[in-house]
Image: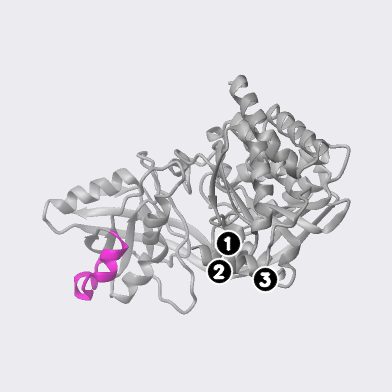
Amino acid sequence: MKVVCLSLLCLALPVAADVFTDAELATARELRERALDGSGGFDITEDLTTRIGPRLAGSPADAKAVAWAEAMLKASGFDRVWLEPAMFPTWSREFERVAVKSPVEQAFEALALGYSPATPEGGIEAEVVMLDDMEALETVADDQVDGKIVFIRNRMERARDGSGYGPAVQARARGAIVAAEKGALAVLIRSIGTSTNRFAHTGGMRFDTGVRRLPAAAISNPDADQLERLMELGEPVVVAMEIDAQINETYTSHNVIGEITGAVNPEKIVALGAHLDSWDVGTGALDDGAGVGIIVEAARRIMALDQRPDRSIQVILFAAEETGLWGGRAWAQARRDEIGNYQLAAESDFGAGRIYALSAKVSDPAWPVIEAIHAELEPLGIEMAGRRDASGGPDFIPARPLGLAAVDLHQDGTTYFDYHHTENDTLDKIDPDDMAQNAAAYAVLAWLAAQSPVDFGSGPELLEASQGSE
């Protein structure tokens, strides 16, 4: 393996050497090797998930997590650490119960979906109508679902890049809204996840104060299989649902930001992101405690150097990603008039699997810089992927309409959705060696992006170029 890596590095040297100085490349390689020898920020993730645990946006644990993050970034040695407010409606869960009443009696493993309202006192008991997916729900006649519980049975497909999530998650995001328009009483969905274990996957419904929503819950994949079999018997299936949950008053949490101040152009910034909140089940180790550890560890490696980078590097721990990208929205809104200063953005929010590919959305003059950065990532087993299709990660999506230049470091998500938004998202699912590979990649990316001889093109022109290539 070492021989292969060395040969790849030798092939890449001419490209990288045309863009960066020998000293800059030597520093990048030093960062890479030192990060590989470490734990990738596992200690940070361990501390967050142990001291704070689950940290639903707007909960008392959310406030504790913000205080923890501020103290942790200061202790890590950042030149500046500060908080920026993010406001959002909060939601809290008390309990949920879902059970088949006929033709058999059986309790299901369920979790209410985020922003689900409560059922009426005593719950709902009604016949179930089963639909294949959101398209089936949108096209079914109203009288077929009126007064019934809608069960959407679409199954998420496993994929390394997580591509099965987007099509399947529409049932969770919009199912209760569409079903409400058709007169349904409640919604059940098959968990949006790939696990065959008998626990449910929660997640957010779309939130709009002007739209009626129904009580909604996800049931575990094995229970969804059982419900399908019961429906296929051809007899009416009656389910009882009871949910106690509520939307609370608007709350102000905070994005927590640490900065390594640039020595030459401090106003120009390379942004690394992760989100601090989690759902109220599990401990949010993969989603997104791992991301917090990875990007802070990358920054710690850079701060341990004898020099500061030319541009500033900021670590942004976003608030309330899970319930609607509220921290990302606040961050983007506050930077509408200065997005050109944000050279490049990249977020770690897909667990702790090894990074296998890089894609980027940058201006044409900056593409050789991306290729040169990739040359220094190639020894980590990272290939070059698409051009123009990077978002930077979920919390940077609200800044996409501003033309934010972005890089995606694609992690192996083959098993990520086995644990996503479940009680089983816990620290034992993380491999420190995989985290170290991630931290090495982010450290090299951040350092070389900060040393780039050209800017990466954030602004309206990059937005237009990206739209033109779609």
Q: Which residues are magenta?
A: 133-148
As drawn, the label of residue 333 is: 3
Which element type, helix, strand or loop, lies under badge 2? strand
Foreground residue among 462 and 30: 462
As drawn, the label of residue 397 is: 1
The residue identified by callout 2 is: 248
**2 or 1: mark nearer the eye:** 1
Looking at the image, residue 28 sits to the left or right of residue 198; the answer is right
Q: Is residue 208 above or below residue 169?
A: below
The reply to whether residue 297 is in sight is no
The reply to whether residue 465 is in sight is yes
What's the CA distance linking mark 3 and mark 1?
Answer: 12 Å
Location of the N terminus by quadrant is top right
Residue 400, quarter of the rendered image:
bottom right
Residue at 59% across / 23% down in the picture?
Answer: 4
Residue 448, quarter of the rendered image:
top right
User: Mark 1: which amino acid?
Assistant: Ile
> Residue 237's x, y, as percent?
18, 57
Query: Pointer 1: residues within 10 angstroms few (<14), some, or many (20+)?
Result: some
Query: Pointer 3: residues within 10 angstroms few (<14), some, or many (20+)?
Result: some
